[in-house]
Amino acid sequence: MKPDCVRLALQKSGRLYEQSIALLKRCNIDIYHNYRQLLARTNEINLEILFLRDDDIPHFVADGICDLGIVGENIFREECLIWEQHSPNREFPAKLHTRLQFSHCRLSLSVPESFSYSLNSLRNRKIATSYPATLQDFLDRNGCNAQVIKMEGSVELAPKLQIADLICDLISTGATLEANGLVEAETILESEAILIQSTAFQPVSEAKQNTLNQLFTRLRGILQAMHSKYIMLNAPKTQINAICKLLPGAGSPTVIPLLDPTQVAIHAVSGEPRIWELMESLKKAGAYSILIQPVEVILP
Ligand code: PRT
Ligand code: ZN
């Protein structure tokens, strides 16, 4: 390991792998590795990647073996709660740094179709889950007395196999639940991929902090740009105010004179997610020749 090198833990394979690599690529960070290699170097920035199972990532970051990690919030939250149970006087030595806006899912209680769900209905029931600490925390906060059954996988089968009455598991599309005759009853945690940072050895050296800042700036720029669009349009001069009002989050749009003195071009960056509705409103307000482009990066 080069001195002051920042080490980032990524999932070795699985749901987070592709998008973690793609996000780093957008930050201009290429990773040189093959599937057998667990440690990889990157180009230009002083960053090393360690490939791990997602469950191990919070531990490697909390132990300070890795400075950063990309992991599901569900895994991080579970590890924080387990830590709290064993070391109530010391915070988990890793913190959530940035939400990365991919791998969205939710940890929910789900019940067989015949089960009539309410918090009261959980009393003395068996609930199967791979997230016992997160579930127990939910039950305690709601004063529910239920039995938590820990399962490592195939949690959806637990009611059919009569291992449990209901389950608490991750859902993204809901297709797996449906295929197993289960219905989502209550979400207990919303989750997405997050960047976590070690707080085990603070403060870090100046050189390491510079590399961390470099990486954080690039990530911020990419994440801000992810849902932004660059909008260019022409409009009659009389419509400038009406059109600028329709461009939320655009700061101050650029208004450029055109050869025809009655017309202008307006350029703006917009974070509006409903882009088709926005285009229709712009058209109604008199805009024409509307051009919308993706934004690569935003540095405030
Ligand atoms: O091998 P390793 O331990 O590293 O990986 P893993 O098999 O434990 O995890 P992996 O790759 O399956 O998931 C990694 C992370 O992706 C999770 O920790 C979540 O943060 C996130 N994620 C997003 C999901 C899902 N969506 C998801 N749908 N993780 C699991 N699922 C499973 C869920 O458990 C259920 O079995 O998919 C099924 C439900 O999917 P739907 O689409 O049918 O609802
Ligand atoms: Zn795992």
Image (cartoon, helix red, strand yellow):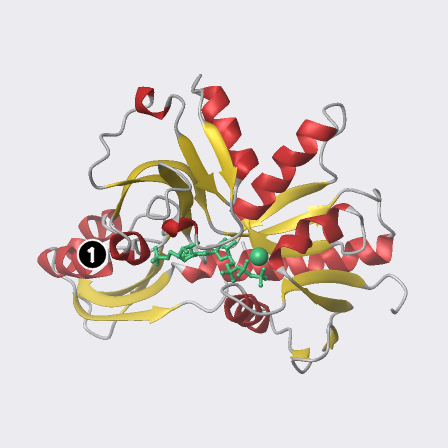
Left or right position of 66 against 29:
right
Determine the residue positioned at 62% across, 33% down.
81
Look at label 1 and name its amino acid.
Leu
Q: Nearer the viewer, residue 97 or 126?
A: 126
The answer to which quarter of the image holds residue 50 is: bottom right
Relative height, residue 131 to residue 228 (above, below): above
The image quadrant where one finds ligand 2 is bottom right
For label 1, being within 8 Å of ligand 1 is answered: no
Q: How many marks?
A: 1
Quarter of the figure that contains the N terminus: bottom right
Determine the residue positioned at 31% across, 56% down.
173
Place of residue 45 in the rendered image (x, y in percent of width and height, measured from the top left): 74, 70
The answer to which quarter of the image holds residue 168 is: top left
The answer to which quarter of the image holds residue 12 is: bottom right
Quarter of the figure that contains the C terminus: bottom right
Place of residue 199 in the rendered image (x, y in percent of width and height, measured from the top left): 76, 42
Q: Nearer the viewer, residue 62 or 295?
A: 62
Q: Secondary structure at mark 1?
A: helix
Residue at the far front in the pictured view = 162
Determine the residue positioned at 76% across, 28% down.
90
Question: Circle 1 sits on which residue?
Answer: 278
Q: Is residue 79 visible?
A: yes
Place of residue 142 in the rendered image (x, y in percent of width and height, measured from the top left): 43, 20
* Number of other residues with Cα within 10 Å of mark 1, as a class: few under 14, some 14 to 19, many 20 or more: some
Q: Nearer the viewer, residue 240 or 53?
A: 53
Relative height, residue 212 to residue 63 (above, below): below
Place of residue 207 in the rendered image (x, y in percent of width and height, measured from the top left): 85, 58
Residue at the far right in the pictured view = 3
